Image: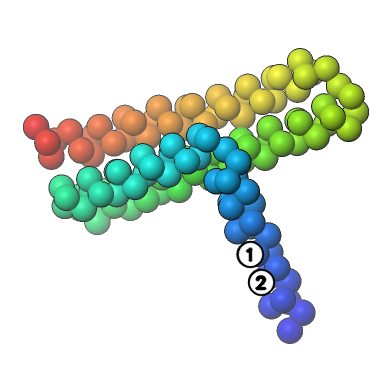
Amino acid sequence: MKRGNSLVRSVICALNGIYQTVREERNIKIELIIGAIIIAAGAVLTISPFEWLVIILIIGAVLSLEVKNSSTEKICDLLNQSLNLDPQLTKDPRDMAAGAVLILAISSIFIGLIIFLPKIT
């Protein structure tokens, strides 16, 4: 029984993390809107099951990496505040995490073009 409770607590904590990110971060709101538009476009243009798989995976990856980026930023903020650090000391990890999101976002644009351009031209 304890194992089940632990799993439930873990899921609740994870959902709280997602909620906090959506509540506090502008970029994930933008990504959620873009994801919804892409899903609607997929429905209208009747993409194949494989294309749905790719779209769902890439949307999930972008959102997941944005949550990770937000957690990196929050950790950097906490370090800066608690240790009274110069914000420049945590600039590199912030930039690296943001760069990872940018790489995935650019890749997702190309994937979207590959899937959707043939259907609209």
Label 1, on which residue? 11
Tell me where residue 60 appears, x and y as whole percent: 45, 48
Residue 105 picture quarter: top left
How many residues crowd mark 2 within 10 Å: few (<14), some (14–19), many (20+)? few
Q: Quadrant of the C terminus?
A: top left
- Indicate left or right for 21 with 1 as reference: left
The image's mark for residue 50 is none
Closer-to-camera residue (17/4): 17
Q: Position of residue 78 (x, y in %)?
A: 80, 34
Q: Quadrant of the N terminus?
A: bottom right
User: How dense is the environment of label 1, judged by Cα within 10 Å: few (below 14), some, or many (20 and up)?
Assistant: few
Amino acid at the residue labelled 1: Val
Work out which residue is located at the far front of the displayed protein and give it. 23
Q: How many marks?
A: 2
| Badge 2 vs badge 1, beta-carbon distance below 8 Å | yes
Q: Position of residue 86 (x, y in %)?
A: 83, 17
In the picture shown, does residue 81 fall above or below 12?
A: above
Residue type, label 2: Val
Separation of residues labelled 2 and 1 (CA atoms): 5 Å
What residue is pinned by disc 2? Answer: 8
